[in-house]
Every structure is written in structure tokens, then in C-alpha cells.
Amino acid sequence: PAATQLRIVALAGQGRIGEAESLLSGTMASPEELLVILTGLAPLMDQLDSRAQRDLGRVQLAAARRIDSGRSTLPAEMAPVVDRCLAEAFTATGDLPEAIAIYETLLKSRSRDRTLLELIANLRVRHGNPDDLQRAKTIYRQLEGLDSAGSSAWLRTRLNVARVCHLA
């Protein structure tokens, strides 16, 4: 999967999005294997310019939707992975409200997941409307409560609270 992920990202970075799409859609991988490929794309996409990220996000979204359409045939523990792939694809395509909605749904079963909380707060700040900024502030305050007062993690979170208050 790692070689496939790198090849897809390299093709997208070269503007050869059709080839990247063909590589991803043409893979004979099972849905589970395709999910492994998709979950590995998000961290690699940071290397691409914004246009290539959006283009590859559309390819990722098409593949994630294809897997989502067969969700009922997947083991139940794969559902959050499918959801995360969809959310990552929506983020890459710039559809932040869709991504946020999926991540918020995932948060219902993992309310103290620091990584997920930070991701949602960051996306909400990026989206930037007043409701999103208010929710980001609430999340950052929740994160404050997860850390020891005065720790470096607590201080970073505290600074994010101040930043969001300034933006709002």
C-alpha cells in the first residue's frame, strides 16, 4: 500500500490526476486494502500544492464513496475508518462543513479523543464562521481540561482559546 500511496501522490503532484485516479480505481484491492491506501494519503497530501490537493481529494472522495456504498458488507469496526476517509477527502476538496459533520459524528463515540478534538477545532477555525469559532472555543476549553494546568500542552491549548476569542 505504501508504494501505491506514494505513486498516487507523485502522479497528482505532477498534475497527472487522471493517472492517479486510474491507479486508485484500477487497484484490485479489497475494500479493506483500499481503505489502508486511502488512510495513508491524507498525511502525504500535505506535500502537494492546494490545486493538486483538491484534485487528489476528489479522487479520494470517489474511492471513499465507492467503499461507503458497500458499507453493509464491511465489518462493523471498519465503519469509523470509512467515515474518516470520507472526512479526509471532504477536507482535501475544501468541503469543510461536510468534513466537520463527519468528524463530529465520530466524536460522539470518542468524546475525549484529543487528536479528533484538535482536528475538529482546527477545521472549524479554518472555516471561520461565527458558529464554527464558538464551537472551536468550546472544544479548546474542553482540551484545556484534559491537560495539567501549566503544562506545555495546556499552554498551547490556552493560546488557541485566546486566538479563537480574538478571531470571533
Image: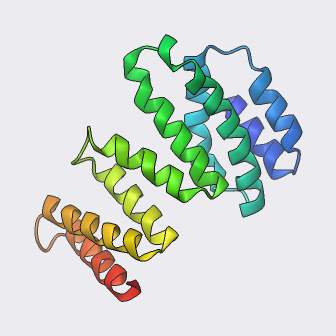
Residue 86 to residue 24: above or below: below
Q: In the picture provided, is 45 more to the left or to the right than 8?
A: left
Residue 158 to residue 79: above or below: below
Of residue 41 and residue 101, the one placed in the foreground of this image is: 101
Q: Quadrant of the C terminus?
A: bottom left
The percent position of residue 120, horizontal first and vertical second, equals 39, 57
Tell me the residue at 84%/29% (across/down). 22
Of residue 130 and residue 60, the one placed in the foreground of this image is: 130
Visual colour scheme: rainbow
The percent position of residue 28, horizontal first and vertical second, equals 73, 14
Residue placed furthest toward the left: 149
Tell me the residue at 41%/85% (across/down). 167
Tell me the residue at 54%/37% (across/down). 85
Of residue 102 and residue 75, the one placed in the foreground of this image is: 102
Q: In the picture provided, is 31 more to the left or to the right than 122?
A: right
Q: Quadrant of the N terminus?
A: top right
Q: In the picture provided, is 164 more to the left or to the right than 57?
A: left
The percent position of residue 141, horizontal first and vertical second, equals 21, 69
